[in-house]
Image (tube, coloured by chain):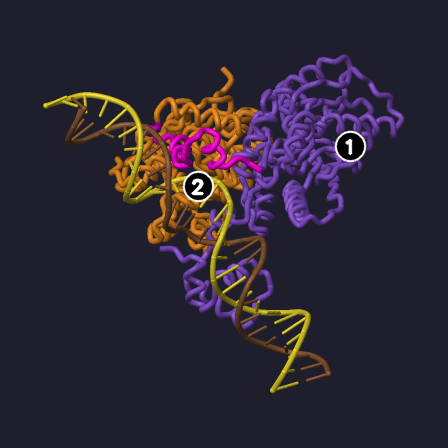
Chain colours: A purple, B orange, C brown, D yellow
Amino acid sequence: MAATIKSVAEMAGVSIKTVSRVINKEGTVKPDTLKRVEEAITALKYTPNKAARDLASKGASVLGYVYDNPNAYYIIDMQKGILDVCRKNNFELLIHPCDASSKDIAKELVDMVDTAKLAGLILSPPLSEMPDVLGELDDNNINYVRILSGDGAFDSSLPYVLVNDFKAAFDITQHLIKQGHTHIAFIAGDEIHKSTIERFNGYKAALKDANIAFDESLVIKGTYSFETGVKSAETILAMPSHPSAVFACNDEIAAGTLFGARMKGVDVPNDLAIAGFENSPFSRQTFPPLTTASQPTNEIAQHAAASLIQFLRAKKAKLPHENLVHTFVPELVVRASTEKAS
Amino acid sequence: MAATIKSVAEMAGVSIKTVSRVINKEGTVKPDTLKRVEEAITALKYTPNKAARDLASKGASVLGYVYDNPNAYYIIDMQKGILDVCRKNNFELLIHPCDASSKDIAKELVDMVDTAKLAGLILSPPLSEMPDVLGELDDNNINYVRILSGDGAFDSSLPYVLVNDFKAAFDITQHLIKQGHTHIAFIAGDEIHKSTIERFNGYKAALKDANIAFDESLVIKGTYSFETGVKSAETILAMPSHPSAVFACNDEIAAGTLFGARMKGVDVPNDLAIAGFENSPFSRQTFPPLTTASQPTNEIAQHAAASLIQFLRAKKAKLPHENLVHTFVPELVVRASTEKAS
DNA sequence: ATTACAAATGACAGCGTTGTCATTTTGGCT
DNA sequence: AGCCAAAATGACAACGCTGTCATTTGTAAT
């Protein structure tokens, strides 16, 4: 029923190999024949059979996007960015939400790559920051690109994308300090995420930079969740002479903190300033809207996917390839939750 | 390098066809040989080559999930549900976010099915409710399952999943009425979504049921967005003797309304009760939390995917199949945004 | 035992491409 | 015109599996 390379070849009066050359843009076809073939392709509405292609060329062009992240907005943005690049490069995408805390996660990924014959993986935090998972992937010769939190290049034959949480956290803290706060609480997210550490370090660095003594008692451990924020608000407000500002490790925590403060009748930002991180859509929709840091998720995703594809191509062609690295610095977004009405 | 069906056959001392029978669970293999083959498979870590399989059996086992929906939580839930079923049935999933308002959307989908040799599509609203898109799919003999808003079965040879927004909206409105409200505004979402219409009808039915005259001036048109909520709040609060309650077509609008009310210093729920729809995670995280209706998105997704797969199998085997229909009724979730402190 | 028939297994031809290598065509030089 | 290398094209085997049909093996009834 559907057109095949053979029917196109017959119609154009050439061999199937020539048609193959045309669809693969090998560039060794005379303009004249090229045109005939292209016309035949259009006329027959021919699209190459992917299965046959994959079989003949050994190995499919499918990437896997692996994630364990509760932030739906982040995931959706990542998916869109990756898909864009995949479509442009004739790759397909397999998504794989999973449980990073599962004991067999590494094996699960290896199996998946194996079964689906994946060309490579794209890893989001926290998976991209788990040494044992990465080690297992390395052992099995699996290609992957990582998106992770960090502020400097490191040695790796595989591509990766860095997000400089340190710098952004520094900026946010500095912003709070400029608003006159000296007593700033920090609410941490899951420690399995390197971003938590980086943001914490940025926070400390900004304090130091402003000659404000770091006070351990102002640091609250938690997870990247609304509930953490709610509980932390209670804790913070119960402190004798409580902090006048809070830097929450992400918007969800910040929203929870805001909620908790509200419950206690506390005025934000006048009695308590609150800053988040990530620029989730809802950070704009809380009341008051949250000061936060914005990372270009879609762009990050595109860079990650593009690097991986470039890497795979270089590898296939046995070309040497440069170390593919990109760094992004989330940008400070100031909103009402940290700015006193003037 | 990797094991093939041939190497397994050799090791087990059988023909490749027998191995094929084993991996396809055809069930016509003697227990004895079965065991030998399975051992060989394990020993060699053999996994069938998907491309070869697809090629030989004409047509891959890949479903496409097509959506144009700004609600990230909904999409993530849907994906997870679909993915679960796909994995269980050895199907793969291709996700396809798209723009339903694009003129060529129907063509885009047909092309996609064609190119990726998809076995079928899963359609979310609003795509599942657009006659011209469906018509084009029908014309091209594309198999699909729809998830749509409605309250009764209809004739269709293809499976579909119904969500009874009418009933749920009725329940929400009734809840507001029971709280003593008689002056209830309705904020509509995009009209391209049938859910908007259904929810509107449910709202009207509940009013009628309580002998409250329907007042056209209390209906505000909008889109499923936070901004619509914010603007509507202004409109509503500017009304002479403004409504005491609002039924917003979804949580995002409701959150916006809440935000807008807050801006004006209005007390929710005492001066204005607000109800949403969808039970988005953030409906629990606004202050006060929103009354809403909860739909089991994950389950809906699973049913949709399962019906489609069942349909495809029946079709392939040329078996007659019953009309595969499931109906879900979202459940009322009462929270502080509509309950006056007692 | 023999026959008859069902169950289990195998041989082999595709499926629609790409890769390899052989062949033909082309165009620039003498 | 004649020659040669380079460019263009083609023939054909693989890729790893499934479908079809033929063959062998097992089983129950005579």
The residue drawn where x is 50% and y is 46% is: A55
- Residue B83: percent from the left, percent from the top? 47, 33
Q: SS at mark 1?
A: helix
Kind of residue sitting beneath label 1: Phe
The answer to if B5 sits in the magenta stretch is yes
Residue ID for mark 1: A166
- As drawn, is B157 to the left or to the right of B196? left
For the residues labelled 1 and 2, say whether their Cβ atoms are less than 8 Å apart: no
Q: SS at mark 2?
A: helix
Magenta range: B1-29
The residue drawn where x is 71% and y is 39% is: A158
Which residue is nearer to you in this view: A40 or B55? B55
Residue ID for mark 2: B53
In this orientation, does residue A302 appear?
A: no
Q: Is residue A237 above or below residue B76?
A: above
Quarter-of-image position of residue A64: top right
- Residue A18: percent from the left, percent from the top? 52, 63
Rendered image: mark on residue B83: none
Other-residue count near label 1 (Cα within 10 Å), few / some / many at <14 / 14–19 / ≥20: many
